[in-house]
Structure formats: C-alpha cells, structure tokens
Amino acid sequence: MLRDETMFPLEGGCDCRTLRYRMMTAPLFVHCCHCRWCQRESGASFALNALIEAERVVHLGAEPEIVDTPSSSGRGQRIARCPRCRIAIWSNYGGGGPVIRFVRVGTLDAPDHLAPDIHIFTASKQPWVQLPPAVPAVPEYYDAAQYWPPASLARRQVYRPRIEAYRAELAQAQQASPARDAPPR
C-alpha cells in the first residue's frame, strides 16, 4: 500500500504517556497477524504491527522495559513495554534482532494512518473475521520480495547486512558459552 509520506513523522505511546515515540518515516510494511501467538499476547483476534528500522523510531519519553518472551519460531521476541502501565509498544523478533521493530499500530496517536498491507497466518484467524478482498492474505508467512513495494525492498537491502551481523554475533556467542539446558557431565 502506498503511503502519503507527508503524514510522517507519526507519534505514539502508552496509555499513561510515560513512553512516547516518534516514527520518523513510513514503515516498511504493515502486518495484520492472525497467528494464535499474537491472539494470545494481544488478547484480541489479531495484532497489527508496522515493521520499521529501529533507528527510524525515536524515543521521546522514558525507556521501555524489555520483556523476553517465547515465540512460535523458537527464537523468541523482546517486547518493549511501559514500566508503569505495561502497554506493549513494539517487539523485536529473534530473526531480525534489534534492527527491526514491530511497532504496535494501536499505540500510535493516529493509528488509522496505517492500514494493513497484508494479512498473515490467516489459517488460524478467527472464523468470524472478514478479510478485505483488496488486501493480500496468506495462510502463513510470505516472501517479502513478492509483496513489499520497491522502496521497502531497497531499504531492506540497506539493513539486511546488520541483521546478518547480528545473527553471526549471536551464533558466535552461543558457541562460546555452554548450553544452558545441557545436563551436567
């Protein structure tokens, strides 16, 4: 979906206004995720997340509390929450590490500016949720090259080396330390 760049930056935050942020540019893409994990974590039928490079999200208030949680991929996610009202502001998933934020669209002051670009994990959507026919929908995840607009794919080429470096650093750290779950010898 093409977005009007003149509407950015957009600001958002938590309910108590302790955490505030500014999304400096349009996100790469907006997911409406219908997986059971997102349903459970949000307490709703889906989660609406704007994927954006972390450096394009500026903190305006207090620093969030980072909560490590499991994920269906097994790589976990780090949820940034307000330390006071506990609202989740964004997540960083294991695959992208700290490079990409999944900003909760509902935390924006004007969330109506970011409609979903795609519905994902629709195989587990609630049966009463009606998907708009003009928005792509896939039963699980998808290939970004097939759905993302060219400008977002170009941005992806810029940040991809940072994700690869993060993954390599993580793998190296895991090799250097003994497995935590390994039985004692």
Image: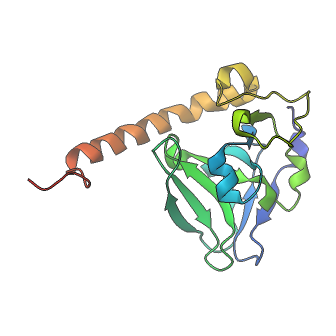
- Residue 125 picture location, percent across and down: 75, 40
Residue placed most toward the observer, 41 or 167: 41
Residue placed most toward the observer, 56 or 94: 94
- Residue 5 picture location, percent across and down: 86, 41
Residue at the (53%, 44%) spot, across then down: 72
Q: Is residue 168 left or right of residue 97?
A: left
How many marks overall?
Answer: 0
Q: Is residue 108 left or right of residue 43?
A: right
Residue placed most toward the observer, 153 or 36: 36
Point out the residue furthest to the top here: 146
Tell me if residue 102 can be seen: no
Point out the residue furthest to the left here: 185
- Residue 108 picture location, percent across and down: 81, 59
Residue at the (65%, 31%) spot, across then down: 140
Relative height, residue 78 to residue 97 (above, below): below
Q: Quadrant of residue 107?
A: bottom right
Relative height, residue 157 to residue 23 (above, below): above
Q: Quadrant of residue 86?
A: bottom right
Q: Is residue 176 left or right of residue 93?
A: left
- Residue 91 picture location, percent across and down: 61, 54
Q: Quadrant of residue 127?
A: top right
Point out the residue furthest to the front here: 127
Relative height, residue 73 to residue 139 (above, below): below
Residue placed most toward the observer, 172 or 21: 172
Tell me if residue 171 can be seen: yes
Residue at the (19%, 51%) spot, across then down: 178
Relative height, residue 168 to residue 11 (above, below): above
Residue at the (62%, 31%) spot, across then down: 156
Q: Which quarter of the rendered picture does the N terminus lie within?
A: top right
Q: How is the image coloured?
A: rainbow
